[in-house]
Image (cartoon, rainbow, N blue to C red):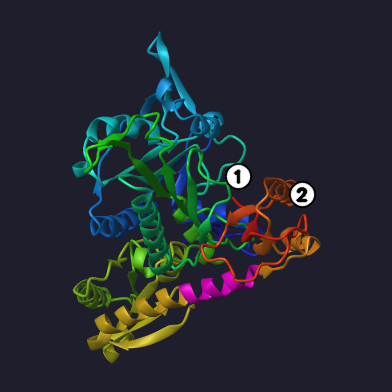
Amino acid sequence: MAKDEKMDKGITVKKGDDLSEWYTQVVQKAELADYGPVQGTIAYRPTAYAIWEHIQEIFNGMMRSTGHRNVYFPMFIPENLLTKEKEHIEGFAPEVFWVTHSGDNKLAERLAVRPTSETIIYTFYSKWVRSWRDLPLLLNQWCNIARAEIKSTKPFIRGSEFLWQEGHTVHATKEEADEEVMRMLNFYKELVEEYLAIPVIMGKKSEREKFAGALYSATFEPMMPDGKALQGGTSHNLGQNFSKPFDIKFLDKDNTSKYAWTTSWGISTRLIGATIMVHGDDKGLVLPPKIAPVQVVIVPIFKTGEDAAVLKKADEIRKALASHGILVLLDASEGKTPGWKFSEHEMKGVPVRIEIGPKDIASKSVVAVRRDTGEKKGIPEREVGASVMALLAAIQSNLLAKARDALQKQITETDDYAKLKSTIETKGGFVVSSWCGADACELRVKEETGATIRAIPFEEPKKLGNCLICGKRAKHKAYFARAY
């Protein structure tokens, strides 16, 4: 392989110098996605989709442990349904894709391509819920979503079409709905921190930032390396705001008819983008082992006349690792040097590389290389399975520890408005400040800095100062930040 071809395959900018260009190159050169012919659309390539499948498997296990089941609902929503909940349609109208024709025939009523599914799902729920015996109704769907993103698109982070899960549940009381909101938010936290190795802050959204039509919204928010927050996922108590217009009633145990309480909650392929940004480095993608499609790659190093022996031993190592449940790839592809393969699998973020050649066979050992640190380690052949398992666990822990340290460095606490503005402008990150709860004060921060309230902690501090804007007695501590 020519030297210049190898160099062309590498990342040409440093992550710390130009995160946006670095991100774009990683997405393309690590073969995660390719741009579609319609703005804001992408093709998910095998590695990215395999990560999404891991996320699905993990979250499905969590949901099923509490009785949730997967379903699927139509993607076309008649206009009359989408407009039933006034606040909801006002929030989503600018982003809706409308279908107006069937072939050459104009439709009598426009159809929305789902921007979210509350309205279509609750049309069915109004028929399915009759009695308290039907509750709670705990359903979830994995699907695609279409929203007209024409200003700023970025693969996985923000697009006109993306993949997500959206859970929609029905409950007899507000208290049961509140419990569901927090149950799912805590599942999300476990998924993102324990599997994606990304630490988050959690809290409620302000009234301005909550989901359109919700009673309240809870959120988890990771911080990206450029100092911008990313809304990782949300969980909403919709109150009776949808059950009343959609007539979701049930006959209670006291023989009276009551409106139900509903929740919705979701995460999307945006989590893939967060993983790229948080863990990637100047060589490309760095994947946490728990969600990596390939956890270990074996690269045989040949010398003339010894190919068969090296390949035989490499395959023995592959089988030993696979017997421990490790996702392992033996790269015996021809026409590429070992150095090329090293760079290729580093770019794709494979957590561990195993090198094996004639000298390693003679010493009955292999060389293991960590993707996160670049550290090399000799491992006796007889210990390869257990040693690599331990190595993968160490990488997972290290990535989370590094990300937690980075998050702490991106949190600034101040009640001085001038400092908030200068921090947002120069350093970025979360700025934790006292806030009176007034819409006008929140809006002023947004207009003057571009920062919004990302989360209001569930547990408020015992002592609150004065609002950083108006100086009145504060009601909350709030996390302000610019966001994607």
Magenta: main secondary structure: helix
Picture quadrant where residue 303 is located: bottom left
The residue where tag 2 is placed is: 448
Q: Which one is nearer the viewer's eye here, 346 or 216?
A: 216
- Give the magenta range: 400-411
Number of the front mark, 2 or 1 = 1
For label 2, the SS is helix
Residue 115 is situated, as x and y percent measured from the top left of the image, at 45, 34
**In the image: residue 193, left or right of residue 92:** left
Point out the tag, 2 or 1, that comes first from the N-terminus: 1
Residue sitting at x 33%, y 64%: 294
Q: CA distance from mark 2 to mark 1?
A: 16 Å
User: Is 113 located above or below residue 374 in the figure?
Assistant: above
- Label 1 belongs to which residue? 208
Residue under the image location 46 percent in, 52 percent down: 233
Q: Quadrant of residue 179?
A: bottom left
**Is 369 or 388 nearer to us in this picture?**
388
Across and down, in percent, residue 172 comes to 30, 45
